[in-house]
Amino acid sequence: GCGERGVILSDTYTSETERITAQAQHEFHVVASVAEGFGYTFAEAAALGALPLWTDIGVYSELYGDILGDIGKIRCTQVLKEGEFRDRPVIFDEAAVVSAVESLLALTDDQKKTLRGTLRHVSTTRMKDFRAGCRSLFKSVIKRIAEPDCLAPFPPRLPAVAEFPQVAVIT
């Protein structure tokens, strides 16, 4: 890692405990994804109070753009045509990162506090809703698999099993 002027860069795997600790202890969190589905890392960091430095991919703009506007936004250049992916992989340059950092550093303490509170509430709510939706979906699937009478309309046709295997669904 690099610790110059309070910046910590890690290029090694970080355990979940280390990640959560870092997100909770640091003012800003870089979410420089080039493509995402739900944007869990962004939501987790925001739920812990870290303000995001984020790429302007579709999912982040859709979920948080109305709250953040251009604050912390790393403007990206699209590299794939519309329609190829929901979030098209992107690239960004040093100038875009500098501009995004400057927008975060320009916030007053009151603005940071307000933004943190809003992001914490919205992120926590969205993660709970996402997990509840996954739980509901998987309960339904497990019920269909576990009850042989329910299998007929549910492709692919799965054989009935005497003992249902242990399955962990982690969201």
Image: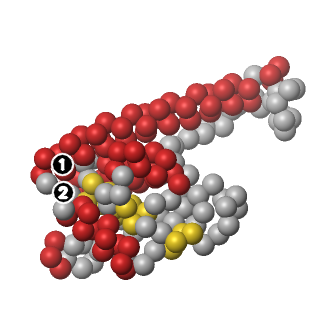
Residue lying at the far left in this picture: please name it. 109
123 in relation to 100, above or below: above
**Residue drawn 58% across the image and 28% down it:** 136
Q: Are marks 1 and 2 in contact (CB under 8 Å)?
A: yes
Q: Position of residue 53 (x, y in %)?
A: 33, 62
Q: Could you say which quadrant of the image residue 120 lies in?
A: top left
60 to the left or right of 150: left
**Residues at marks 1 and 2, CA–CA distance in whole angstroms:** 6 Å
The residue singled out by tag 2 in the image is 107
Graded by Cα atoms within 10 Å as few (under 14), some (14 to 19) or many (20 or more), the crowding at tag 2 reads: few
In the structure shown, which secondary structural element does the residue marked by tag 2 occupy?
loop
Say if residue 122 shows up in the picture. Answer: yes
Q: Position of residue 94 (x, y in %)?
A: 37, 80
Say if residue 26 shows up in the picture. Answer: no
The residue singled out by tag 1 in the image is 111
**Residue drawn 32% across the image and 60% down it:** 72
Q: Could you say which quadrant of the image residue 96 lies in?
A: bottom left
Between 122 and 103, the one nearer to me in the picture:
103
**Residue drawn 13% across the image and 47% down it:** 110
